[in-house]
Amino acid sequence: MKKRFFTLLFLVFFFSHSYSQNSQIEGHIKLNGSTSMLSGVSLYLEGTNFGSSTNGNGYYIIENIPEGNYTLVVSAIGYFTQKKEVSIGFNEELTVNVTLVESISSLSEVMIISGGNTRLKDIPGSVHYISPSDIEKFSYTDINRTLRTIPGVNIQEEDGFGLFPNIGLRGTGVERSSKITLMEDGVLIAPAPYAAPAAYYFPTIGRIQAIEVLMGSSQIKYGPYTTGGAINLISTQIPNEFTGKINLMGGSFGNRNLYASVGDSQKRFGYLVETLQFGSNGFKEIDQPENRGFDRNSGFTKQDYLAKFRVNTSDSAKVYQSLTFKVGFALADINETYLGLTQEDFNNNPIRRYAGSQVDNITTKQSQYSLTHTAKFSESFSINTVAYRTNFDRNWYKLDKVKDSTGTKTKIAEILDNPSEFNEAYNIITGTSSINEDALFVKANNRSYYAQGVQTALGYNFETNRIKHDIDVGFRIHQDQIDRFQWYDEYAMNNGVMELTKAGVHGTESNRIETATAFATYLQYKLTIGKLTATPGFRFENIRQKRKDYGNTDPDRTGINLTQRSNTVSVFIPGIGLDYKFNKHISTFLGVHKGFAPPGSKEEVEPEESINYELGIRYAKKGLSGQVVLFANDYSNLLGTDLEGAGGGGTNELFNGGDVLTKGLEFLATYDLLYFNKQSAFSLPLSITYTYTDAKFLNNFDSDFGGWGEVSAGDQIPYLAKNQFTFLIGIEHYKFSVNLSGKYMDEMRTEPGQGPIPYNEKTDSYFIIDASANYSIHKNIDLFANASNLFNQIYVVARRPAGLRPGMPRAFNIGVKANF
């Protein structure tokens, strides 16, 4: 009996002592190749319930761990998962520091993030990176909202969903993102970036893993557009281990979003397959006639499919080589229109859509192919070559003009600007039966594009007497084309329902082909001597553009009325950036470079040219980081484009805009409000972004373009907000996170002018707040919710292409994210 008592006493003492022990694992998690600590990183002991996450200082602690052997798993979105075997003894305090590597670090040397052999943080000038974890915070499907945290970005919303972005950088103009260099994985992605740069195709942000934005002198590597900057969208990369992901969300306006991917890497090969299925019923309400069986929403569907396959040598090969094939397809069916609202109708119901837009629709089909070869001869020398091809077909079928009973044809923009003057046409648009059967002219803006080329980038670095040398050389041979083959269909309006009365002959509205062939090369040399880094470089572009116009009476393209024209330009684009590090926390940079944009196929049109300057300072210490930049773009000739989407006639002709001066200020600061509380399980990151932009014409001219009209010296460039402000604040824990984002946008002129802005020539200023929340119910499963325009602000985002357009009203989405 006594023996059993002592045995029981021993067991009680043993187990109570075991479970009361204070063994713990603590440490810091930092980014590879950097002193930056990572917050929000999840850590757990595999097969147990012991876990934690890093605070704003990258610190974590896992407490009350029984002694034994464990596998510590360290993971974060956008980084390779790390596993470490640990052994912890009784009452031991074990320190385990871990370095994480970004999962996009395997990107080829043509990427901005590596810049040949240059890290992003070391590029002189203003550069920004939106990481996978940044994108995951809100899981936006609207690129306009994703870019709001980057200073220097100019945006004009159009459809509310971000389907047709209008993005500029540093006052370049926003029209269809045609004045910036757009890339996906370092390859030009606009449908025809030289011949017709208006980006009617834009990669869906829902399948993009990260974003790089580069402004300043170093952008000359990424032409042809070198004034404002470059945006590189990084697609999902092949993972280094078997990984899968499924995101499923739904919400307001019938929104639905499914993303799925799976991938793996073995010693000699890797693959990734993904799809995004995205759609909505739309938030605009099309006028519905009673008892006519008409039912059509203002929504859309988008389907993206992408696959990558890689074969490679072993890591230990004398010359590491890889060959990656990428193929993607994207389909879209969008019930979008150019027809907006009159001021009065907007005031009554901002989400109304007139009956005259009921057949408006755009269908698109995009495909992309690329083959990338990478050869890494040593740590200091590598060559990357990409052969690529993109195809894009679209037909935007939309109301263009109205014919009244007198036979007068009027463009829809003119009708909505003066509804009382064109009363009959306005009534037809809003559903009143037309007298004539050819009252509504719906134009099929049917166009096909392709772009193809080969580009090579070489990176070489070495040291001599403590001086670091980095040399990047690149070449690109490129060709692209746009083929317009358009027509008009005629409709009658019958008690609110449009009825086709005459189908047009294809090729009788616009029937022409424009082709561009370009050779480009660049050389950039980075020299680092102590605290000073100098990066001189140049770019050379030789571009030949030609047009074949078959006229409106030769749909078979026999050439009976053929007219041709061509234009050739060669340009040398120099630039230099300087960076000086006062200490490890503070540095300053200065850049000067030439800005350029191709002039099109019309001989009398000159290239867009400017001299661009920037001066900035960076700071990073104890959880606080930021930069302030002053910039100025001095144009000797600004190019304008007659885009219908920008309120013009739709000829797509370029024209000389003369002297322009754009200047401004960019500010960005981030801080973790709990940085000094190293034991806290929470982080409280705060980010503030501000942009000031002032852009003025310096000469008088008549543009013959409806969006600009007659311009006087001193007029402000339209659709550029002077002041933009964004804040982002969140509370992060390894189990959950909550984020708030606020965006203030100043009012914008819709026409050139100066002084007080007339009421009918401006957009609204607005302040919009979005929110998101994430809760981890399992180490591989998260519940997610977001809200856009939380307080349901009503505001005008544009008065073009025709009439007033609203911003997105309040919308909610909820869903689940699973990883395996």
Image (tube, rainbow, N blue to C red):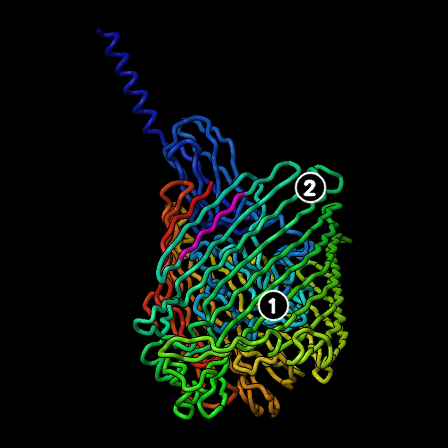
Residue 633: image x %, image y %? Answer: 62, 78
Asked if the stretch drawn in magenta spans residue 244, the answer is no
Q: Main secondary structure of the magenta part?
A: strand
Q: 376 or 468, which lies in front? A: 376
Asked if the stretch drawn in magenta spans residue 261, the answer is yes
Please name the residue that numbered disc 2 is placed on.
Answer: 312
Residue 45 drawn above or below residue 469: above
Quadrant into which the N terminus falls:
top left
Which amino acid type is shown beneath numbered disc 2? Asn
Q: 130 or 364, which lies in front? A: 364
Q: Quadrant of residue 240?
A: top right
Q: Quadrant of residue 470?
A: bottom right
Task: Label 1, secondary structure: give it.
Answer: loop
Give the residues in magenta: 256-262
Residue 710 drawn above or below residue 351: below
Q: 233 or 249, which lies in front? A: 249
Q: 665 or 17, which lies in front? A: 665
Residue 444 drawn above or below residue 584: below
Please name the residue that numbered disc 1 is placed on.
Answer: 215
Q: Can residue 588 be spotted in the picture?
A: no
